[in-house]
Structure formats: C-alpha cells, structure tokens
Image (spheres, coloured by chain):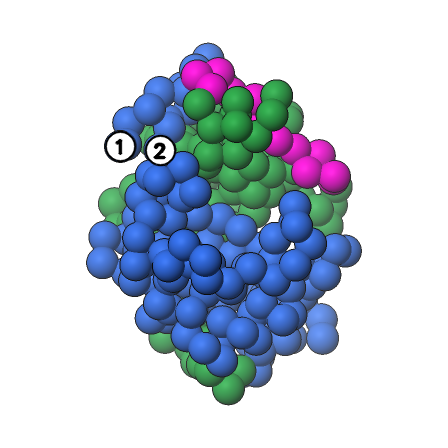
Chain colours: A blue, B green
Amino acid sequence: MSDSARETATRLDPKWDERGLIQAVAVDAASGAVLMVAHMDPAALAATLATGEAHYWSRSRQEVWHKGGTSGNVQRVREVTIDCDQDAVVLRVEPAGPACHTGAPTCFYRVVEADGALVRTRP
Amino acid sequence: MSDSARETATRLDPKWDERGLIQAVAVDAASGAVLMVAHMDPAALAATLATGEAHYWSRSRQEVWHKGGTSGNVQRVREVTIDCDQDAVVLRVEPAGPACHTGAPTCFYRVVEADGALVRTRP
C-alpha cells in the first residue's frame, strides 16, 4: 500500500521499517503523560490488540515483551490510535505500576536544557 | 556510556540506534495531545535545542527537516524531556498549524479497533 493510500485506509496496514518495526508510544489514559516510547513488531501489535495489554518488541532481547508480564506492571490498553502513514501507534493505557524499569512513573523524568544538561524534574 | 549510566546521567548522551537515530514525540503543550512521532539524528537534536523550533530527520528524504520551514507550521519547543536510556525525546510544543501533512491537527486521527478496522475520530 502506498503512503497516500495508508493515510485514508480504513484497515490496519502498518508500514514496517527496515527492521520490521513500528514506533509505539504509551500515554497514561488518566493524566495524559507520556509514559514510555518503544517499538512493536507484527506479533507485539497483534498481541496488544488481541489481549488488551501492551506488548512491545525488545530490541535488546530480540523478542516480544509483554509489559508487566513478570513485574505485574501491566498496561491495560484503553485506546490505540495510528498515525497518517501507519508507522507509529499511540496507546492510551491504565498502568498497574511504574512504566519505567527504574521505578519512575514515566521514563521521561529529566528535562534536557539547551546546553545539554539533564535536570530531574519528576520523582 | 552504559545504559545504567545513562539513566542517572546529568548530561545529554543519546543512545543512537544502528541508523544513528533516536525517537522523537511531539506533544501539544496546551492540550497534551500527541501530535506526531518522528526521528532525530544528532544534527536535528542540536538544531532543536539551539533554535527552540522542532527539527527532525526525514527518513524518506534522508535529510534534516525543519518542521514548518516551508509550510510555516513550525513547532515552538517549550520543553524537551528524555527517557531513561536516552533513546527517545518528548517535545512539548506550541504548533503554529496542523502537525500532519494531511492538514489534520494531529497525525493520530484514527482509532485501531481490535479487528484491525481504522475509525476516523478526529477531524
């Protein structure tokens, strides 16, 4: 499918990149905060849609990763939206615990200043 | 720098992927809506921090792309945050116009249903 066909399509037809992945952003359904940014392969996207819990592709482990499968910090998916050219999805989720493996509620706990300093602004 | 060092670092040291890119998410500073998801190379990130206007890496054109440079729909950057392992940034922006080249305010104008149907929910 061409990019312009993807923009108006009424069926899912992701534009997988050269690695076979799309981008995935998890947003807290209650607060609207961006929790984490990751990737999905076809199996992770299918599992997310089928189970209603977020699954991602782990580039480090090279396998599908059921978020919270071991920690219990699952993300219940309330809504999935896809972008114009179908190479990125946004998940609105209800997180059962911290999104970040560091224990922070969101992975985005530092502000980048213009000079490259990182300032921690969130717990 | 190791992943664990990146998590606690107080200086920017992005973890560029095998293509030399990080992920970049633009969020409307006023509404909190996710506007678009793209990539940045080192030059795009440096230009964003230096100018206060969003710059991305265009994978299709293989060049740095000053968002709105031709259309006028620039994104004034109010805050940049970076994630734990420094391979993704979130920009909180004030958009001067639609984020999407289709004219939609956000690229995420369709909901993905469990059966793969895409339903347009936003103008």
The magenta span reads B9-20
On the question of residue B94 being in view, the answer is no
Relative to A4, B69 lies left or right: left
Q: Where, by quadrant of the figure, is residue A92 drawn?
A: bottom left
Relative to A17, B86 lies left or right: left
**SS class of the residue under badge 1?**
loop
Q: According to the image, label 1 marks what residue?
A: A123
Q: Residue placed at 37% from the left, 59% from the top?
A: A72
Give the x, y percent position of residue B104.
43, 62
Give the x, y percent position of residue B66.
57, 35
**SS class of the residue under badge 2?**
loop
Q: Where, by quadrant of the figure, is residue B95 drawn?
A: top left
Q: Compared to A43, does A37 lie above or below?
A: above
The N terminus of chain B lies in which quarter of the figure?
A: top right
Q: CA distance from mark 2 to mark 1?
A: 7 Å
Is A106 part of what is drawn in magenta? no
Query: At label 2, which amino acid type do we have?
Result: Tyr
Q: Nearer the viewer, mark 2 or mark 1?
A: 1
Main SS, magenta residues: loop
As rendered, which of A42 and A2 lies closer to the eye?
A42
Q: Residue placed at 51% from the left, 57% from the top?
A: A24
As rendered, which of B90 and A96 lies closer to the eye?
A96
On the question of residue B116 being in view, the answer is yes
Q: Chain letter of disc 2?
A: A
Q: According to the image, label 2 marks what residue?
A: A109
Query: At label 1, which amino acid type do we have?
Result: Pro
